[in-house]
Amino acid sequence: MIDVKSLRKTYGDRTILNDVSVTFARGQVVSLIGPSGGGKSTLLRCLNGLEDFQGGEVHVGSEILHPGGAARNQRALLALRQRVGMVFQQWNLFAHRTALGNIIEAPVHVKKLRPEDATARAHELLKRVGLSHRANAYPSEMSGGEQQRVAIARALAMDPEALLLDEPTSALDPERVGEVLDVLRTLAADGLTMLVVTHEMKFAREVSHRTLVLHGGQIIEDGPPSEVLDAPKHERTRAFLGLSRT
Ligand SMILES: Nc1ncnc2c1ncn2[C@@H]1O[C@H](COP(=O)(O)OP(=O)(O)OP(=O)(O)O)[C@@H](O)[C@H]1O
Ligand SMILES: [Mg+2]
């Protein structure tokens, strides 16, 4: 459902993504790992059109993104952003809106849902992320883990076909990580397509179907998590995972 073809992304004379080709199937949960600066966030941002790129194509369902940014991809970007949800490390909720208010914002203003329908759906989503009792709380009144779960509910409110998550637990206190991973585990079991940049190897191993390692602008490993994490092909991956013999 997401098909990346020969993606090339540069910043000035630095190549960040070098001819990356990869396909994500519907219902697949993919973990994306790799050293800092390897281009993981950049790849995610290219996939939902937050970032322009210099070569290749990104196909999401029937929409195709080409190099050229908003000027060339206006229609595809509009469609694509409704099909692909994004959750960031910092949850970025609207500070002046309640949990419920945050969740109904896009369905009402972008999808033009009736407020009462959006609200009913938001309550369902809050239940799904274990936060029915926090519907009227403002972000400043919630823990990081709660805010991140609201951010996930907010992304789901647009009924995305896929969810891209960029280190969704790395800004959280250790004791709050589990509650967010539990939500992702439920979504995975429900068959949501997810691409998760993560440092949580346990999550990669236990929840994802497939693990990718991005290094030097290329995907250097792609396989079942057990294979990639226990018996990687590249010495660079072994070093990153702390498996090196030397
Ligand atoms: N707007 C920008 N302008 C110039 N260079 C950038 C920009 N954004 C990212 N980069 C560079 O692109 C490279 C890839 O960055 P990216 O954020 O995708 O890495 P990452 O794999 O997500 O790293 P981390 O694990 O630290 O989040 C880095 O070298 C970064 O400095
Ligand atoms: Mg990053």
Image (cartoon, rainbow, N blue to C red):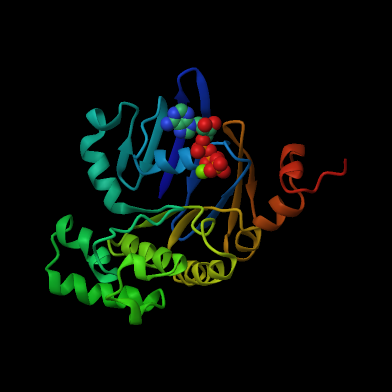
| Residue at screen point 24% across, 47% down | 79
Residue 6 x %, y %: 48, 30
Furthest residue in direction right, as rendered = 246
Judge by depth and name the residue closer to the eye, 169 or 97: 97
Residue found 35% across the figure and 40% down from its top: 50
Q: Position of residue 17 (x, y in %)?
A: 51, 31
Number of labels in the image equals: 0
- Does residue 46 appear to the left or right of 114 in the view shown? right
Residue at image coords 39%, 63%? 152
Q: Nearer the viewer, residue 64 or 133?
A: 133
In the shown orientation, is residue 108 left or right of residue 147?
A: left
Front-lying residue, 45 or 137: 137
Decide if residue 7 is in sight here.
no
Q: Position of residue 178 (x, y in %)?
A: 56, 70
Of the 4 image quadrants, the one containing the C terminus is top right
Q: Is residue 49 left or right of residue 185?
A: left
Can residue 106 be seen in this snapshot?
A: yes
User: Which residue sits furthest bottom?
Assistant: 133
